[in-house]
Amino acid sequence: MRKYFALIALIFGFFGNAQILNPVQWKTKVVQKSATEFELIMDATIENEWHMYSQFTPENGPLPTVFDYKNAKGNFDLVGKTKESPYKKVYNDIFEVDEYYFAKTAQFKQIIKVTNPKLKEVKVYVEYQVCKEQCIQQDATFTFKLPEIKVEEVVPSNVVTADTATVIIDTTTASVVVPEKPTKEITTTSTPKTEEKGLWSIFFLAFLGGFAALLTPCVFPMIPMTVSFFTKQSKTKAEGKKNAILYGISIILIYVILGSLVTGIFGADSLNALSTNVWFNLIFFGLLVFFAASFLGAFEIVLPNSWANKVDQQADRGGFIGILFMALALAIVSFSCTGPIVGTLLVEAASKGGLAPIIGMLGFSSALALPFMLFAMFPGWMNSLPKSGGWLNTVKVSLGFLELALAFKFLSNADLVVQAHLLEREVFLAIWIAIFGAWALYLFGKLTLPHDSPMTHLSVGRLFMAIFVSIFTIYLIPGLWGAPLKIISGFPPPMTYSESPNGVGASVGNTTAAVALPENAHSGPHGIIAFHDYEHGLAYAKKVGKPILLDFTGHACVNCRKMEDFVWSKPEILAILKDKVVLVSLYVDDKRELPKEEQYVSKETGKEIVTIGNKWSDYQITRYKNNAQPYYIILDSDGKDITQQIGYTPNVDEYKKWLEEGISNFKK
């Protein structure tokens, strides 16, 4: 009876699910730039709703596109890095990183300088990932034919020496035939840019930073002083309002110029690339700790007094120039409070790349300038302005605690890049619990710092803030025991980067994590016993007499993680996966190399199978004629299919029904 069900499942599954997907089609061409320089152009057309990922996609997210110039050694040199067309940037709450992707089209360009005049062709191997509801690891090899190279010949840079050719992905080598008669082509380059939504979020956060800076002891007391100056010096109310507006514009101008300088010095593209650089993150961890210590009262960061004196002298010139120097004087005098905030905002914006530093400074300066402008235009409002006092230092110290917490995000980034496992999730959360717990004690008046005024009572505002910080601190604590902490998703390391993937001493589903693993098994998602090798899993299934849940997955497969996080975590599903099946998870993007004796050429695709991921991908394609993940099949303990294959199935009831059907077929 079991064989009958297996045969039906195999036939139905083959015709219902068997498909090799090729969501990306390529066209290539080569442009001769000079006698020995050529530009290799690779254009990708991506099917609707599919996403292909940028070369710059951060670590621990989807797989980036990677180019390997196969026959470069002794034949040609790469001139610069491979450029790519603008990508989109969104935050992925599953991987807890930004992902950079292309939709519909993508273009890649690489200039090469030929060093071997006898070179006939250039071979380029590209490896990339595309995702929709499922993810696919794909690759292609392009062969660019080059004309005979004569060193003395000079070819104008606008001459094209190749036409386009369609590439068949994953099956054959693409080649480009060079036409005898060249044609003209105008080529353009562009730089990656962030989405408008991302820039708006940066502006909003920077605006809040500017408002926070306004409420510090270096800035807040200057509001009445500045307003008084404009009202007394101006001959008419109209002139006072005009000067106030010019003053606000000057403040904005100064900080926007600062953001432009940062972008101009480092470059929009390189700033983004720095975000995953170990040294960048370590340097800014130290910088933010330095800023935090300043805010907490260890010392003050001040610019030389001579700067302020010289600028103040220029402010006496009057007119717009005088007002501009007054704004510059404000920036210099208040630097001990605004400097750390500006520095932090620039660091965070710089890690986003593009125009982010400029937009960030626009938001910060707008919040800083707006009160000066409004109170100068409407002096009567000054009566409602709260008086300066110890509460200003409380704001400054609170910013110090926030700076210190944010600093460890940069240290965590560096640790994740090098996979040192020195700052795993539990350690990160313990540090944050300590920081926010200390902040709560400070707000309750149980801790005092160097510049605090004597406190006779707790104000209502400070009490509310203390309660809020205490609630947040308590919220963090269950994270040590495996709680997802979705409010701060993206700040701590992911769940998989921890001493215990399910939390300290516990696991999901009311069961403990302390279970002995069978030989060759691993602790999978939610403490499920999993095998990462088919033969090992099959042997164990025979031993315990259970069916196999064969799971074709990937470390960088977002919908695989969604299935694990939102479907497998459900108690009714988790109970089945832990007790009634043997999980065999085969990772098609595992980059570990196979032993030389196990490497082979696929009979199905003709590709060289050199990594563990290649092996399982080829197994999926050969056996099931499918190359997408996630992909699930239930097998009996002899390795025969007893269910129809399914892919991404976010409906818990539907997935449970499918599992129960497979278990029922196994028992018959």
Image (tube, helix red, strand yellow):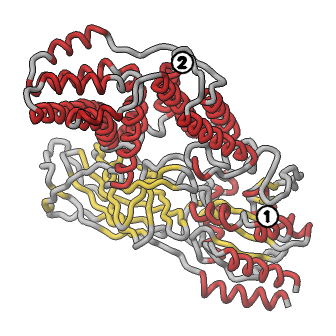
**Which one is in front, 455 or 153?**
455
Quadrant position of the N terminus in the picture = bottom right
Rendered image quadrant of residue 144? bottom left
Q: Amino acid at mark 2?
A: Asp
Residue at horizontal 62 percent and vertical 72 percent from the top: 650
Residue at horizontal 74 percent and vertical 76 percent from the top: 656
**Which one is in front, 447 or 668?**
447
Residue 101 lies, with reference to residue 357, above or below; the image says below
**Which one is in front, 526 or 154?**
526
- Whole-percent x, y for residue 58 in the image: 49, 47
Q: How many numbered callouts?
A: 2
Crowd class of label 2 (few under 14; some 14 to 19; many from 20; radius 10 Å) = some
Q: Which mark is residue 535?
A: 1
Q: Nearer the viewer, mark 2 or mark 1?
A: 2
Crowd class of label 1 (few under 14; some 14 to 19; many from 20; radius 10 Å) = few
- Whole-percent x, y for residue 246 in the image: 16, 33
Quadrant position of the C terminus in the picture = bottom right
Rendered image quadrant of residue 599? bottom right
Q: Which mark is residue 110?
A: none
In this picture, residue 327 sits left or right of residue 415: left
Q: Which residue is mark 2?
A: 452
Residue 429 lies, with reference to residue 632, above or below; the image says above
Callout 2 secondary element: loop
**Which one is in front, 400 or 442?**
442
In this picture, residue 535 sits left or right of residue 310: right
Query: What whole-number distance in Å separates the C-alpha atoms at marks 2 and 1?
Result: 67 Å
- Whole-percent x, y for residue 591 in the image: 60, 52
Rendered image quadrant of residue 214? top left
